Image (tube, coloured by chain):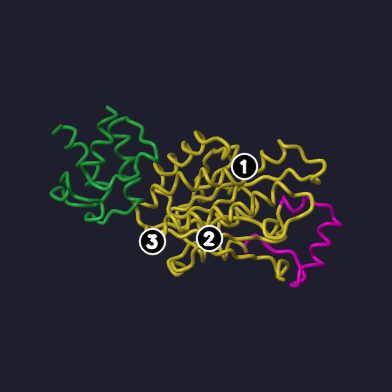
Chain colours: A green, B yellow
Amino acid sequence: MSDNFERFKKCAVDVLSVDEAQVVPDATFESLDADSLDLVELVMALEEEFDVNVEEEELEGVNTIQAAFDLVTSKL
Amino acid sequence: MTGRVVLVTGGNRGIGHAIAKRFATSGHPVAITSRSGHADDAANLLVVKADVTDPASVDQAVSEVEEKLGNVEVLVSNAGITKDGLILRMSDDEFTSVLDANLTGSFRVAKRVSKGMMRGRWGRMIFISSISGLGGQPGQANYSASKAGMIGMARTFAKEFSSRGITANVVCPGPIVTDMLMELTDEQRAAFENAVPVGRLGRPDEIAAAVEFLASESAGYITGTVLPIDGGLSMG
């Protein structure tokens, strides 16, 4: 978990231009000032980092860091 | 002046070439794509080979530009083909192949460069459409459809990427003196000249001037617009 979360965090910091400390499981994308385009960008970066494929419709309802992390890691 | 990295597809001749030369003269680093990978006049231009109907080729070409010049900040989507014929004699293939090159090709390149523009929080996309896309043109059902399609697509780019400092606009040239126009018969060209309120055919540099403006800092509040440059031909 922690190793993957570190990789996830690095992507989020890069793409969303946020502080590492802000990337906590229950942070919402709204609280990170991330819009739908940011989320798509983040998922694209995560797809590359984790070598997984996320479909557009799977992003529905993904509002928090935890949800995005679970979505991506469920495919490993 | 800080140069912006400019990519002009189909910049080896005609309107695209005039646009590329204008940006280069103004001091911007400019890349052009051509199907052959060559251009007769390539001074101050990086020429990359690209077939816009092939996504892998588009990716490779843009990667080459990114490596050599940096992320593309100004895209002039200009590459296009014609396969004219009256509708009754136009095959499905003649229709779809022109759509694929002109419309889907333009989508492929714009999508590919949009990632870099998003990261840079700045971008200018200028799509070279045609007045054929506004008013239709006998013999050009395929070409007109592709050029009209660019308008809806460009406006979607404009809306989806507006929060990232990226603008997308469309320029619709009228009859401009290029090789493509020279494929028309003398009678067809004369008919154009007579129909144009300004009373003459246009020059490629008259398109290039508008494109350069749309790519400038000053044009940051202009997005989703469609600008005919046609001596008044498409009025009313």
Image location (x, y in percent) of residue A27: 18, 49
* Image position of B141 (left or right of B52): right
User: Reading the chain from its start, which is encountered first: label 3 or label 1?
Assistant: 3
Q: How many marks?
A: 3
SS class, disc 3:
loop
The quarter in which the N terminus of chain B is drawn is bottom left
Q: Is residue B214 above or below residue B147?
A: below
Image location (x, y in percent) of residue A64: 23, 46
The residue singled out by tag 2 in the image is B169
User: Reading the chain from its start, which is encountered first: label 2 or label 1?
Assistant: 1
First to last magenta residue range = B179-206
Q: Which mark is residue B101?
A: 1
What type is the residue that disc 3 sits on? Thr
What type is the residue that disc 1 sits on? Ala
Q: Is residue B127 above or below residue A25?
A: below
Say yes or no: labels 3 and 2 on the same chain. yes
Q: Chain of mark 2?
A: B
Instruction: Examine the rendering and report whether any part of residue B70 can be seen.
Output: no
Q: Which mark is residue B2?
A: 3
Distance of mark 2 from mark 1, alpha carbons? 19 Å
In this view, the residue in front, B109 or A9, is A9
Q: Are marks 2 and 1 in contact (CB under 8 Å)?
A: no
Density class for disc 3 (Cα within 10 Å; few <14, some 14-19, many ≥20) is few
User: Reading the chain from its start, which is encountered first: label 3 or label 2?
Assistant: 3
What type is the residue that disc 2 sits on? Asn
Does residue B95 belong to the magenta stretch? no
Density class for disc 1 (Cα within 10 Å; few <14, some 14-19, many ≥20) is many
Q: Chain of mark 3?
A: B
